[in-house]
Every structure is written in C-alpha cells, then in structure tokens.
Amino acid sequence: MVEKKESKNSEAYGIIGLTLGILSIVYLASNGIILSIIGFVFSVVQQKRNPTKFGKTGMILNVIGFVLGIVFIIVALVYLKPLFENQFPNFPIQ
C-alpha cells in the first residue's frame, strides 16, 4: 500500500504540469503564457525527479501553449493596430 501512495505522489508535479499545459492552450488570450511558464516548471521538476509520461506530455503542451500565446498576441496587435490608429491619433506614442 505504501508503494502505491509514493507512486501517486511521485507523479503529482507531472499531473499539475499537464493540467496547466491544457489550460494554457485553452486560455490563450488571458493567462495562457503565464500558465504555460508555471506548468513548464512543474513538468521539468517532474522529469528531473522521476521521468513520467505526464511530465513529458506536460512539457510539450506547455511549449505549444506558450508559442500559441505569443502568436496570438502578435496577430492581435497586427490586426488591432489600424483600430488603435483610428481611435488614438498619436498611436504609437511619438
């Protein structure tokens, strides 16, 4: 019984990293980048302590979430620039 308890605890960081990786993809616009960084740290800690599939999958999902978040921000800024220029004549501040 003790071994089962230790195996569940040894996968905890990987499960947290995996969950944050999924959430980072779901919440691209609001907190996706922050969630992906935190999730990546948890996944790396998991992989250093006890490599599991949860940790590896979490790392992959967090990198995908981070990249998609950056791409989303860049695309939003490019498409919103004309709107800002029309609304705010001095955009960007010169």
Image (tube, helix red, strand yellow):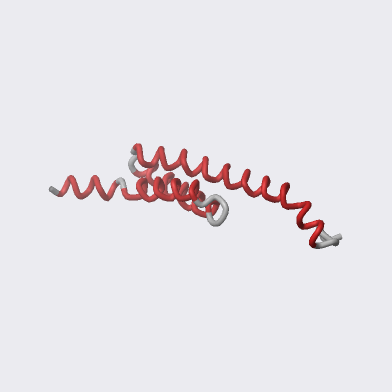
Quadrant in the picture for residue 86: bottom right
Q: In the depicted view, which residue is nearer to us: 80 or 5?
A: 80
Q: Residue furthest left?
A: 1
Q: Is residue 70 left or right of residue 38?
A: right
Q: Residue at x 67, y 49 (%)?
A: 76
Q: Is residue 87 left or right of residue 24?
A: right
Q: Residue at x 40, y 38 (%)?
A: 56
Residue 6 lies, in percent from the top left, at: 22, 48
Q: Residue at x 40, y 49 (%)?
A: 19
Q: In the depicted view, which residue is nearer to us: 69 or 60?
A: 69
Q: In the depicted view, which residue is nearer to us: 45 or 13?
A: 13
Residue 4 lies, in percent from the top left, at: 18, 46
**The C terminus - image quarter:** bottom right
Q: How many marks?
A: 0
Q: Residue at x 40, y 45 (%)?
A: 18
Residue 77 lies, in percent from the top left, at: 70, 50
Quadrant in the picture for residue 14: top left
Residue 83 lies, in percent from the top left, at: 76, 55
Q: Is residue 84 left or right of residue 54?
A: right
